[in-house]
Image (cartoon, grey):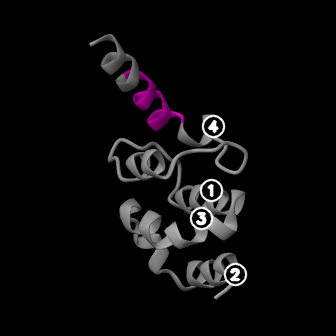
Amino acid sequence: MGLDLSFRIAKEFLLRHFLTEVDLQNQDVDLKILMSLLKNDMLHVRYEEQIWEAIEDWVKKDQGARKVHFDQLVSVSESDLFLNHSFKKRQVKLLGQ
């Protein structure tokens, strides 16, 4: 029970301080953990573009291995922002398509 409580407290902290405490370009965050955070309704961001920046930073850390997960990460975030034309252009640039 102690580990479950500790995990829940840590997850709640990450959701509240996601972008100030988690440096996705310099830390090795597991894909499953990142997806869990991105799809959580309690994720606190000031503006939706921060979700894109987080995904972009995570992919850039190991672009060769991680770019295959881009669509998966975008889909769990449930943000309409990614339908925007300017973000489509940024996606092409990031993924080299």
Q: Earlier in the sequence, mark 4 or mark 1?
A: 4
> Picture coordinates of residue 31 (x, y %)?
49, 52
In the depicted structure, whether residue 58 falls above or below residue 82 = above
Q: Which residue is mark 2?
A: 93
Q: CA distance from mark 4 to mark 2?
A: 25 Å
Residue furthest out toward the top = 2
Task: Indicate the secondary structure of the residue bearing disc 2.
Answer: helix
In the drawing, does residue 57 fall left or right of residue 52?
right
Q: What amino acid does circle 4 point to?
A: Thr
Q: Which residue is mark 4?
A: 20
Q: Which residue is mark 1?
A: 58
Q: CA distance from mark 3 to mark 1?
A: 8 Å
Q: Which residues are magenta?
A: 9-17
In the depicted structure, whether residue 31 falls above or below residue 92 = above
Residue 59 falls in which quadrant of the image?
bottom right
Q: Which mark lies nearer to you, 4 or 1?
A: 1
Q: CA distance from mark 3 to mark 2?
A: 15 Å
Q: Residues within 10 Å of mark 3 (few under 14, many from 20)?
A: some
Query: Which residue does the image show at 69% across and 81% down from the upper left?
Result: 93
Q: What amino acid does circle 3 point to?
A: Arg
Task: Indicate the secondary structure of the residue bearing disc 1.
Answer: helix
In the drawing, does residue 18 fall left or right of residue 25?
left
Determine contact: label 3, label 1, CB under 8 Å.
yes
Q: CA distance from mark 1 to mark 2?
A: 15 Å
Q: Which residue is mark 3?
A: 66
Q: Earlier in the sequence, mark 1 or mark 2?
A: 1
> Along the line of sight, which residue is nearer the eye, 51 or 62?
62
Image quadrant in which the C terminus is located: bottom right
